[in-house]
Amino acid sequence: MGAPKERANLVEMFRDLGNEPNDAELPTNTHFPHLNTREYMLRMTDPGQNTDPQEFHECFDINRPGNVVMAINDYRTRFQVGHFWGFQSVKAFKERGSAPPPGERIPITNPPITALKFVQDGLIALGRTTGTIETWSTNPSMNGYFPVDHKNEHVGIIMDLDVFSKTRSKIVSVDNAACIKLWNVNFLDVESTHTFHHAHGDSITGVSTRPGSDDIFVSVSRDRSALIWDRRQALKPASGMLQKHKEHLTAVAWVLDSGQEETHLMKVGDNSGSILTLDMRNPNEIIKEISAFNRPVKRIKCSEGFYAVCGLTNIFKIYNINDQLITEDTSMTDFIRDVVFHGKKVVSLCWNGEIIEKSL
């Protein structure tokens, strides 16, 4: 037998080298990892423990009492993260200063959030870039948040989700892998009830549930089509609403008339900045088309005879359901990411955290 091999000196291997190089010396130093590597990040304080909101405000929602939840992501690092925050009101958000009180922040560090909705006044559903659906519960004072359940059943990035308004216990989510999933949600768990793979020929960019229904919804996609879905139809749940439009479809919302009664009309946004009016009784027919922006439409929200729309611009507009312009705001200094109706006001959220309220 040969001579025994020398034992590894573990003390020497893992000793603290000290004298960490400065930023200029780091790229050529073999003893310390690069700033963008996971090893370096693990040496740092957990980014979820900071008390400052990130810079990129993605989406938000407001419940009936006026509580606000907001998704704020960080896209500056190699490993992107997403947080969500809660506030008692829009006013509390505006007056938050550099950071909200500790109780109003949900201290969670996870992948970026792409969709966020109140299912009920105390129940929140959100979707992430990893395809995860999560539910959280809270209380009217917004001083505590409790994880309910989460499911990792989407393959792609969740692009949008919506709540069925009849019972407010069901949601629908869509992803960029052309998959649609329906869920039962409550304060105990999340349960997937239906899955439609290859629902479109490309990424699904928007979904909207029919007011007053727990079964019917519409989806739009980059494949330039819109589909009406009825989950009660087991053999053929989808029917064509619009096929081979000239542009990618980017957003959709079902119209409400002034009496809060359901209608057959919906508003669809496309990649050229146009708003299309479609009627489910007349498939493949555009009832009306107007030009809202010269850039893609980002969000459309409807409420009581009006709808609000924002695009990849610093402008948002409010129309009545007959497409007459009611008001237009150009005061934002960055792109507007989301708009929400609350009572007789429309609230818009800017990429940099600015928030504007407009009365109807």
Image: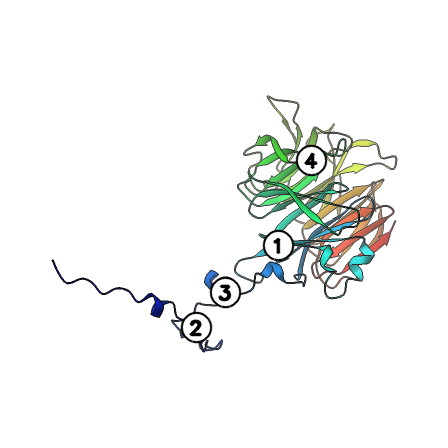
Q: Earlier in the sequence, mark 4 or mark 3?
A: 3
Label 3 crowding class (10 Å Cα cut-off): few <14, some 14-19, many 20+?
Answer: few
User: Which quarter of the figure has residue 208?
Assistant: top right
Above or below, comparing residue 310 to residue 288 in the picture: below
Measured Cα–Cα span from mark 3 to mark 2: 17 Å
Q: In this rendering, would 320 be left or right of 145? A: right
Give the label, 3 or 1, closer to the camera: 3
Q: Earlier in the sequence, mark 3 or mark 2?
A: 2
Tell me which numbered mark, 4 or 2, is placed earlier along the sequence.
2
Label disc, if present, on residue 27 of the rendered structure: 2
Indicate the position of residue 135 as horizontal and vertical percent values.
Answer: 66, 42
When the figure is inspected, residue 229 is found, relative to residue 148, above or below; the finding is above
* SS for dot 2: helix
Query: Height in image: 132 above or below 89?
Result: above
Q: Amino acid at mark 4?
A: Asn
Residue type beneath disc 2: Pro
Quarter residue 174 falls in: top right
- Judged from this view, the residue extending furthest toward the left is 1
Mark 3 vs mark 1: which is more N-terminal?
A: 3
Distance Cα–Cα, label 4 vs label 3: 39 Å
How far separated are the C-alphas under marks 4 and 1?
A: 23 Å
The earlier-in-sequence mark between 4 and 1 is 1
- Residue at 80%, 55% (x, y): give it: 90
Residue 45: give x, y in percent of width and height. Answer: 56, 64
Q: Amino acid at mark 1?
A: Gly
Circle 1 residue: 82
Element type where label 1 sits in the image: strand
Disc number for residue 186: 4
Checking the image for residue 43, the label placed there is: 3
